[in-house]
Image (cartoon, rainbow, N blue to C red):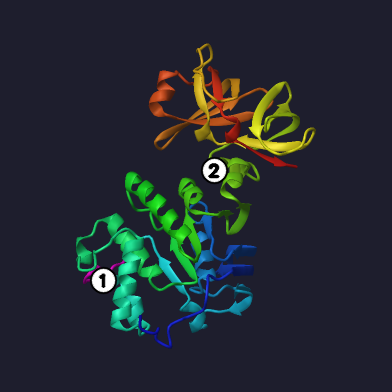
Amino acid sequence: MMATAPHESTAPGPATVTGRGLKVSYKGHTVLDVDEIELPAGRTYALLGASGAGKSTLLRVLGLLEVPSSGEVLYDGLPVARADLAARRRIAAVFQKPYLLRGTVEQNVGYGLRLRGVRKPERRERVAAALATVGLDGWEKRSALTLSGGEAQRVALARAIVLRPNLLLLDEPLSYLDPILKRDLTDQFAAILASEDVTALYVTHDQDEAAVVANTIGVMRDGRIVAEGEPRTVLALPSDEWVASFVGTEPPVVGRVLSHVNGVAAITCGDTQVFAVTDAPVDAEVVFGVRPEDVMLFEADADLPLNSARNQLACTVVRVVPRGAATRIVLDVGCFRIAAAVSHGSAMALGLAAGSRVTAVFKATAVHVATR
């Protein structure tokens, strides 16, 4: 392999990216106000939030595309700024639309390498490797104008990772694709990001997408990060009622560990027991929750099938809320509420309406627990 051109960025390894005291204001209106955020080296951090929450603004600031009104950005502990060309050469981006150039796939993927002075033999080798990574082996001579939406977005991702960036920015990269293609590409993007030695900042309004691709999720509201942590925890144990409503679940429930048997804890709340896999000790006060997609519903008097689900709770339907392809069912268990997500057909077949009696069934492994 030929040597890399001297002026190409050769900073080793993924960057740890930190933002401190970041504020952005437009005409006196604050659109971003983040005390601190850290993107761990080699991991994927997803910014999740509704449109206008400040996600893309924070991405632009951390990616040195926009200067904050106040605060600082650090790469590997060193302050960087928009004028820092060496730092900016360590960054690559994938946006909502691929914005491919006229010409071949090879010309598109190798464009950034050509600008960096990488010579043709190495450029071809790296383009081929990047295309193989995104599942487009041998597509070099295809016309970029003939690609489908999903193919074009994979070419855009290849164009970014071929640069071997230390920071990869992805701003709603799958939002304009149809649901089936989006689901498939989410899995592919997640696998690629996990295999690449790169720090990634992934902006999305889709919580399922964030849960699949990210090691850490930050939930944004009105320019602030209002929840942050491992995806399972953020989505199943929301930090407040607003976050619970946004991620489509109910607020966490406070309970106490009553006993442990074979790694499964019995947690009490009022007269109700919930079984969960947790190492929280007996008598510990905990919070727990379950994601709606992990809850199955049956008629109140149905003969339940034999399965490994330890939790079978009698519930009253409080609210039925159609949401996209599914219906969200809010259930009153007695001392707490949970939610279930069922298909529209299942909701109709069960006759679900406020006041209906049903049985909610979910596994002990589906219950997320944290000590207080």
Residue 44, numbered label: none
Disc 1 residue crowd, few under 14, some 14–19, many 20+, Cα 10 Å? many
Residue denoted by label 2:
247
Asked if residue 318 shows in the view, the reply is: no
- In reply to whether residue 134 is colored magenta, the answer given is no
Q: Is residue 272 above or below residue 286?
A: above
Amino acid on which disc 1 is placed: Glu
SS at mark 2 in the image:
helix
Which quadrant of the view contains residue 253?
A: top right
Q: Report if the CB atoms under discs 2 and 1 are less than 8 Å apart.
A: no
Amino acid on which disc 2 is placed: Val
Residue denoted by label 1:
106
The structure residue drawn at horizontal position 39% and vertical position 63%, both measured from the top left corner, is: 95
The structure residue drawn at horizontal position 76% and vertical position 37%, both measured from the top left corner, is: 281
Q: Is residue 62 above or below residue 235?
A: below
The structure residue drawn at horizontal position 33% and vertical position 60%, both measured from the top left corner, is: 154
The structure residue drawn at horizontal position 33% and vertical position 51%, both measured from the top left corner, is: 177
Depth order, front residue of 284/84? 284
User: Which of the two discs, 2 and 1, labels the residue nearer the N terminus?
Assistant: 1
Q: Return the x and y of residue 283 as percentages of the image width and height.
A: 80, 33
Depth order, front residue of 171/16? 16
What stretch of residues is rendered in magenta? 97-107
In this rendering, would 278 be left or right of 295?
right
Q: Main secondary structure of the magenta part?
A: loop
Disc 2 residue crowd, few under 14, some 14–19, many 20+, Cα 10 Å? many
Asked if residue 360 shows in the view, the reply is: yes
Depth order, front residue of 279/107? 279
